[in-house]
Image (cartoon, coloured by chain):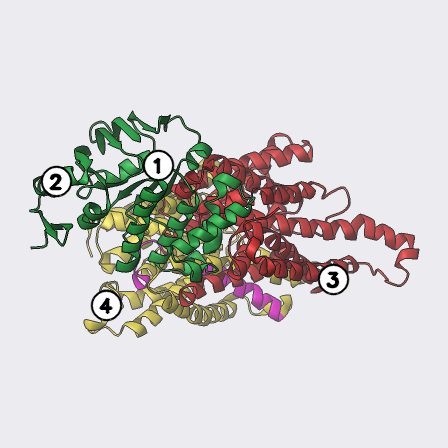
Amino acid sequence: MIDISGLSYGPAANPILQNVSAEIPAGRVTALIGPNGAGKSTLLKLIARQMTPAGGSIRMDGLDLVQAVPAVLARKMAVVAQHLSVASRVRVRDLVGFGRWPHSAGRLGPADHAAIANAVELFDLGGLQERFLDELSGGQRQRAFIAMAYAQDTDWLLLDEPLNNLDLNHARNLMAQLRHLAEAQGKGIVIVVHDLNYAISWSDHVVALRDGQVAFQGPVAEAATAERLSALYQTPVAITRLEGQVFAQYHR
Amino acid sequence: MADRRLIVLGCLLAAAAALFLFWGLRGPTAYILELRLVKLAALLAVGASAGVATVLFQTISQNRILTPSIMGFDALFLLLQTGLVAGLGAAGASRISGLPGFALETTVMLGAALVLFTSLLSRTRHDIQLMVLAGVVLGVMFRTLTAFLQRLMEPSEFTMVEARMFAQFSGIDRSALMAGLGLMALAALWLVRHHRVLDVAALGRTPARSLGVAYDGLQLRVLCLIAALVSVATALVGPLAFLGLLVTSLAHSLMQSHRHALLLPAAALIGALILVAGQTVFERLLHLQSTLAVVIEFCGGLLFLVLLVRGKIR
Amino acid sequence: MADLAAPNTAAPRRWLLLAAVLLVPLALFSLLVGAGPLPLDTLLSDPQALRVLAVSRIPRTAAVLLTGAAMAVAGVIMQLLVRNRFVEPGTTGTSEAAMLGLLAVTLLAPGAPILVKMLAAAGAALAGTGVFMLLARCIPPHQVLLIPLSGLVYGGLLMAVATFIAIEGGLLQYLGVWMSGEFSGILAGRYELLWLAGGLALLAYFAADQFTIAGLGRDVSLNLGLRYGQVLGFGIITVSLVSSLVIVTVGMLPFIGLVVPNLVSRLMGDNLRESLPVVAAAGAGLLLVCDILGRLLRYPYEIPAGTVFGIFGAAVFLYLLLGRRAGG
């Protein structure tokens, strides 16, 4: 479980996050939702230790993240950032291989090679293995980075808007993979998503942010109601059921 | 023409010139005065042509940070000079010094600059950063080639070239000065007639053409003008990379106008003022030798970095 | 040791082999070229020729190889740390800062031993590079060309300060010597510091993976548990030391650190574990070619290797710049 309490970030006069407390369950897919500028990515980056909070604490399975050593954290959680601009020319296979760095420090054993091959297979990168990152499309590069994070084989996986560059097929596949990882391997998955339908149909748990504060949180079925979502986005959102699936309807 | 700011600038320049001429004047007055007059004329010519050339260059490249020197114009001039001496030998080169030598140098410079920079401009038109970086590297290459040629030379040829390498405001060639002033007069004449069309050209190629300006021909002529003006400045005192940038930034912030009728005279006056005032302070007050160029380079470079970090160049 | 590239090491090995095969005859040829003739047939029986070989030719060839390799490695490290293809110690103010430090120590303590001078230069280079890194942080990384541009202007700024001090202190000739890298003065006893530069390049190889990961950015590095700050610090120290060592012993050599890594990266990418040996070998080989050319073009006079490389390097750099768009 990730236990966030009293978290704040940014200048006191104009905070980006203010007194955020949330519980993110282990072994589940949790979606961070909310309108633009609500602080979703900031919260994810604070959990990922890419930034240091101004106040409050984050504990991951009892481990205080503010105090933790990078090498320990890297075996605990893997992060995929939103912007993946890479200037250096690295092959896809080597990039995925770097996901094993926290375990092997560069000396890859048979287990590492198996993990790399598995990640390449799982994220449909077989044909791209020998290509350089700068030769890939945005979506392909995204998949390569997600594969690297997967190869890291951690209890927690954090993804910042992973669907941004993906087409329908790969987006759906990714969400299915993430669900599978949570259900079969008990990994905790935290994602920032914009598409409300992906959030409510694939995740177990939501944390909704608005203006740097938690608007509501809880299991999807209980928390994501039409009233709450409408208030969150300041847009009428209806929840409909179609063939056993839940849909958020807000187009017109 | 009677813009108050220009008049103030003119008065300041006149005061600086008077100070330069008459401060600490003693001994053989007539002789010293003549020496100082030549030097003053050179300072005025260099400052004015650097300022005007930079404004023109910024107009045809449509940005506020390029200067002909950043793009390697003066490095090209030095390379041509060195190449001329290397090709003709010291004896041949000294035979064509003075006015014909200056004319030859300027003609060669015009041709080379046109070929090089029209191709560079057309290749990098949409990418200012690429253009600047390519220009900087081109400048480095010209300088290295110059050094290379110098290594191939006889020592007597080398001393001949070496005298022209550093920006120095002493030892000015009078015939080159006269030729340079003549060239500047021609340039001024052209600009007086054509400054309005430059205002339109500054909008860019497509808008200017849709307004009926024969842009490509104009650009060619302006490039010629720039090459000539840079030749004047570099022939007289050697390379000064950032003087033009300093001058145009000041001119723009003072005049707050896109009109060349205001910008060009302001740039000429400011360029001359910086050099005359700076040289007066350096020579008479601080008694430093020939380091004004270095200080100008420092200030101009600093300005460039500040503009860059503050996002004015993106 | 199974490394990251285990499934496919054939291609990199081939490049390394090629570089090594070309380096050996080049080095042998370099031993034979010089102001005095060195007859091959009587070489081993002629004590005079052996002395020339031991005192001048072998040190010179070794110096060129070490310098070329170390500068190329410094360049590639700089490119990964700044995450920009177009930087090297000569375009980040590192070399100019080192010269400033050297100038200061020459003015303040003219009799200081060369190691002290080197350390002063390295300290200044470290500070200068640090300031550049701060400057580069103000520029978003996708402004690819702005970073080398600001570096060049920043270097010019430091150079203006150095020129001012040199003119006032009457040290302009020193500046001229430091600015043009050449190997004609290399004799046994005068170049040994360069082994240190070579050693640093070797040390960098052991951190090859760390540098490659750092090249993927701070976020990825942190995610993989890398101590990003430490890698950055180690890289900057290595680059500063290498640059200062080279400037103190042979003078500034621009473009090697820029051109060589770019060429190698085009062929085999930026996984340093694979490419660093090739980068080093290519840097050594190219510089040696330039040095040999400089010795032959105007025999028996010499053209500095730095000048020869400057022309070649600037041309290649321009090609890389202008061909970038066309190549995608």
Observer-side mark, 4 or 1, equals: 1
Which chain is indicated by disc 3? C
Task: Indicate left or right for C59 with B303 as reference.
Answer: right
Relative to the observer, which residue lies in front, C263 or C296? C263
Provide the residue designation for mark 2.
Answer: A232
Give the magenta part as a residue range.
Answer: B59-88
Which chain is indicated by disc 1? A
Chain in yellow on the image: B
Q: Amino acid at mark 4?
A: Val
Q: Residues under labels 4 and 3: Cα distance?
A: 63 Å
Image location of residue C166, percent across then percent down: 56, 40
Describe the element under mark 4 as helix, strand or loop. Answer: helix
Residue shown at 89% from the left, 63% from the top? C41
Observer-side mark, 4 or 3, equals: 3
Task: Indicate left or right for B141 with A159 as reference.
Answer: right
Provide the residue designation for mark 1.
Answer: A48
Provide the residue designation for mark 4.
Answer: B197
Image location of residue C276, percent across then percent down: 58, 51
Drawing shade for chain A: green
**Are tags 4 and 2 found on a single chain?**
no
Provide the residue designation for mark 3.
Answer: C25
Whichever of callouts 1 and 2 sits on the residue coming sooner in the sequence is 1
Describe the element under mark 1 as helix, strand or loop. Answer: loop
